[in-house]
Image: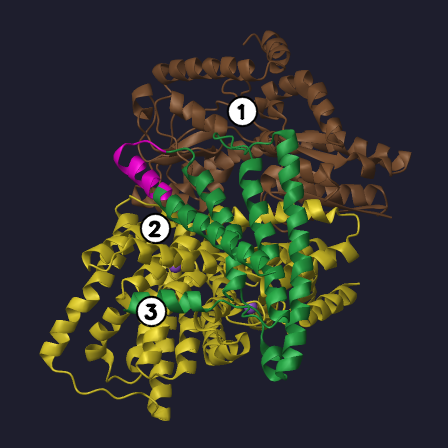
Amino acid sequence: MDRFLKTVDASSRLLEGCAVFLIYGFGALMLAEVFARGFLAQSLPYSWEYSTFAMASVFMLASGRAIRTATHVRVSLVLEAVSPKAARMIDAFANVIALIVVAAIGVSLADAFWSSYSRGLVSATVVRTPLAVPQVILLIGAIQLWFDLLARLIRRWTGRDYEDRDADALAQETADA
Amino acid sequence: ETKWDLSTAWPASNFHAKNAMAFADAVREATDGSVDITVHVGGEIGVKITEKMSAVENGIVQMADMLLFLQAGASGEPLLSMDTLPYLIQGQDEMKAFLEVAGPTFDEIAAKHNQKILYYVPWPSPGVYTKQAVVSADDMSGQRIRAFNAASFEFLDKLGAAPLEMPWGDVAAAAAAGTIDGAATSSSSGVDGKLWQFTSHFNPLNWSTSSDAVTVNLDAWNALSDQEREIIEGLADKMEAEFWAVSAAEDSGKIAILEENGMTVNEADASLKAKMAEAGKAMWADYIAKNPDAQAIIDSYSAKLGK
Amino acid sequence: MMLEIGLVAALLFVGLLGSSVWIGLSLFATGYILLSVFKPNIPMDIFAGKVIWGSVTALELLSLPLFILMSEILVSARLGRSLFSGLAPWVGRLPGGLLHVNVAGSTLFAAVSGSSAATTAIVGRVTLPELAAHGYDRRLAMGSLAGAGTLGFLIPPSIIMIIYGVVAEQSILELFVAGVVPGFCLAVLYMAYIAAHQTITRSQPQIDRPTWSDRLMALKQIGPLVGLIAGIMGSLYLGLASPTELAAVGVLGALIIAILMRRFSLSAMISAGRRAVRTSAMIGLIIMGAALLNAAFGFLGIPKAIAEQIAAFGLSPMALIAVLLVFYVIIGMFLDGTSIIVMTLPITLPLVTAAGYDPIWFGVFVVVAVEISQITPPIGFNLFVIQSQTGESIGAIARAAIPFFFILLAFALLLALVPQIALWLPGTMQ
Ligand code: NA
Ligand code: NA
């Protein structure tokens, strides 16, 4: 079990790392467009399109880690009002619902990916990017999110430390030091 | 009673959206309310502008008003973007001749995607809005102009301009600040966006004419009674002509509005025309090389018009 | 039928959100179930896939993650602390003190960012920890940030104004200009409230009287941030970057500041990036869910039906505006700004222009209504941003924002009484 949880954590961090690379990357790409257009009177035709694909990938790839670090927001009114035991039950219930909803998101994204891949669909711009490429990245992010939710449920239910807020605190401390 | 949803990408004030609503009203009236079409404008129901054909195919909506060339990528049908080729189709008369030749192919494509084309409505032809007059080939050189689709990007590039992509919402501020020199779009969109506030010249280069098509899902269509189908087809035939007239009036009316607001409307001189013809023909050849199926259509159409 | 749909939607909403299901997922599930039940013919897996893909690849969103990244880099460079120690000698003894930094900061960043959520994220990341450290009232700190963050839409550039301009066929430039005076008026109202609150409650932490040399020394600390804002604005007005691209310029500027202040390290930039992508993912998930829910409402025609009902009343101009304000406040609880405009404008705009109002004026009015929607639960993006920054509950943040909700409401009515607040400046352009 611990091995499973560790594997999920590791891949979650890895995908978050990819998202960090992508967010800096598309920032740089937009700057490159600004520079090319302003100083070389040239435009990089792929800059906008790749940037939106990178952004979508950032959203999904970091989503699992956002669950793990309790960054995704929720209405905690009821959780705070009831006994710890009841809160644990409600939280587990919410976690199961989340697993079902994310499964539906995953199926939808798989569907989008598969139809783009099998029919060779491309974007409607001059770049003609095969849509299956960014869409498979989104799908991977959704799968990771699902496993992070599963790992969270297991941790919560077996009395392990289920939210990794320390990561934030640590980063903040290094910033403040 | 049949209830259909029709999705159009354009806002309620656009003439395509108004046409679609007029069609829905006419169908409701002629069928005594037995076919009730709800028109959803803009981004109201989350169907992207490039995914109209696919949305009809999958039965997400029963009808859609779609800009044909935008469906090429997301439907995997490159032939749908044929009308963006420069100099192939210029104006409504040529569009009519083109559809006579290409119509059967488009019908086949539609059928392959589980739908049927009811009618077409062309857009006014595109031109370039710029801060300085663009008359000659030299004027065009290095102009940073926002392109509106893949073909216009390639075409402007071949003309020596510096085409670029940018969200439409950024164009006003970017042109006002001098980040870009202008934008390529139709007279109609130019008036909607009040482009005279930051550009002063319009050159209606008329290098291409593109068309919207209104289609209906075949499952939904076949579920109608024979009589209902007959009524709708009759209306589509009759109203198509009216809608084309609306589009023509739109173009001339909008150019007049541009002039009233102080824009200078220029015409291309011989040097620019020559360069445009050269660029256009080169793009035809590229396009046919990539899409051999287009050869027969383009040949028979250009023979017919002597192009 | 409409009643039935409304009831099911409300039950799902309360049930899911109440049992603490994550907000983005609750929205998604509500939209999914509503469509499955009331539009059973739609192939939901295909449709949901298209809606997700369309919503997260929208060009209008591009600046949001980058502005979040910029603010995280600024936090890593400890710019918040510099800003506060720089401003404290100047405003620390005024009524309201450093709380005004929330409003002033939001006003400034609103002038470079097109979205309210981004403005809130940038300013809050820097100010909230510092205000807490200086001992200011936590509630007022969060509330004023939620309120002031909404200026992101009113002060140009503005994504919402662009959408209004496209849908209503109005000049985006005129709308931008029309937003300037109302934006500053609103900022002044917020500051007045903060000053009054702190004077009456006497809860403002007191600092020693600063000397003039303290003050001059402090200016140096504010320098980098002023330089950053000037750089971002400069790149827009000098014609280098388009409004969306400003965010990328901001990231570059923040990195340069970090390097100049010798607070740059690769590991710090990576952890800033990690925090930024997580916050982006949080917002991305809500955007996805909201897109599906909005599509469901669009398909089922709920906002349209209500707007048509209002049209049927045949109200006097002032009553019409009052009713529309109530209408927008209510749908603003559940829908996002873009959907509010796209779904209602085809009906409300003709009503309003027929009643004699100017479409540019109505644009400003609708933007204020959209700003209200940013701070009303259950769906209020400013609340979500502040929750992710403070860990407070949505309820607590929404309660903190109530005074600012009323200020916005009163301001919307003031706009109706004195349309010149919005129309004077664009009028001078003609
Ligand atoms: Na703004
Ligand atoms: Na709200």
- Mark nearer the viewer, 1 or 3: 3
User: The chain shown in green is which?
Assistant: A
Amino acid type at image mark 3: Glu
Does the stretch in magenta take in A42? Answer: yes
Residue A131: where, in percent of width, then height?
Answer: 56, 36
- When asked about the image quadrant of residue C151, the answer is bottom left
* Mark 2 element type: helix
**In the picture provided, is B32 more to the left or to the right than C107?**
right
Q: Name the residue under label 3.
A: A173
Q: Is residue C64 visible?
A: yes
Question: Ligand 2 is in which quadrant of the figure?
Answer: bottom right
* Mark 1 element type: helix
Amino acid type at image mark 1: Thr
* Chain C palette colour: yellow
Q: In this view, does A177 lie above or below B61?
A: below
User: The chain shown in brown is which?
Assistant: B
Q: Mark 2 points at which residue?
A: C246
